[in-house]
Image (cartoon, rainbow, N blue to C red):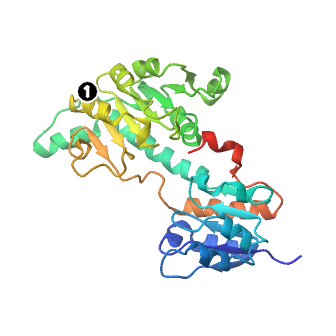
Amino acid sequence: MSMPTIGIVVHEPLRSQLFSVGDLERLGRLARVKIYEGAGPMGQKEAATFLADCDAAIGSWGTPWPSGAVVSACPSLRLWVHAAGSVKRMFGPHLAGRGLTIASCAPAIAENVAEMTLGCLIVGLKRILENAAANRLGIAGKVPNARAVGGCTIGVIGASQVGRRVIRNLRPLGGRILLFDPFVRPAEAAELGAELRDDLVALCRESDAITLHTPLLPATTRMIGPTQLAALRDDAVIVNTSRGGCVDEPALITELEKGRFFAFLDVTDPEPAAPDSPLRRLPNVVLTSHIAGGPDHKIGRQAVDDVEAFFSGRSPAMVVTADMLDRLA
């Protein structure tokens, strides 16, 4: 049996951010590898020619994707691995009956986002940033409202891949974990290590910190609004590494301007936040530039793992099908 051919349509420097030398070498032992060497992102027309003889393709952020033109020009293509997260735009009538497997590296990204989320919760609840700011001005005493995660109640909103990993990372630290997700049953929540809540207001009222991990869908748009924010305790911590549109941002700013709680926001609505947004100047906000799930070698490693699994007759880590799109980011 001849070796399959894999086309990597990821440009530099993104390719080096995603793939270690070792993983590219490993890919080369699995298949004949074609690597796009252009100076900038490849276009869709160029991808249709480049991938014409390929059995699999690996793309990422800002790269070509399996559009109708690409799919029709590449009859041998059986696998598309997206070394990034959302694959929604790839789907459409052009894939019907085509037999093309679409795999997302969202699991690897979820690990990174969950890691940053845990860091934000630890730093926020310990009041590290407030204490450091006070020490710049002189000798600051102990922070009276500093708490360890293990002594707090953390409200996790969304049992997504990230949300589940956040729960997994929190469990060894102790503490109490609440979960809101209408698609999860109490027994499943208990198995994850959380107590299910069917009311967001109740979850906010009970939590010392809340962290959002939901896709942006009609049902989740501005799901954290004035009522939920008002229910939060003074000195609460909010972490949003999901989508800015899941929070009513004007209502959030109103509460933050009162100084009632601290927010770590990796996403905003709109994104990026306007240059004059209060989120850029409020002392109780840490605003980052959607960096929680950025490119790293963990993502490229999963992409190679997915290729190896597929050509060994096994399933990639996260195969996405059209019927899943209404609940994915």
In the displayed structure image, the side of residue 10 where residue 49 appears, left or right: right
Image location (x, y in percent) of residue 329: 55, 45
In front here: 143 or 194? 194
Pick the front one: 94 or 246: 94
Give the amino acid type for the residue marked by disc 1 in the picture: Arg
Can you give x and y, in whole percent of width and height, for residue 34 in the image?
66, 79
> Is residue 322 left or right of 124 when viewed as pictured?
right
Residue carrying label 1: 260
- Residue at screen point 64% across, 44% down: 325
Residue for point 41% across, 54% down:
291
Image vertical order of residue 75 relative to residue 294, above or below: below
Splitting the image into 4 quarters, where does residue 186 fall? Answer: top right
Q: Which of the two residues, 118 or 147, is positioned nearer the viewer here?
A: 118
Picture coordinates of residue 157 (x, y %)? 50, 31
Q: Quarter of the image holding residue 229? A: top left
The single residue placed furthest to the right in the displayed view is 1
Would you identify the image quadrant in which residue 193 lies? top right
Residue 57 in the image: above or below residue 327? below
Neighbourhood count class around disc 1 (C-alpha, 10 Å): few under 14, some 14–19, many 20 upward: some
Residue at disc 1, secondary structure: loop
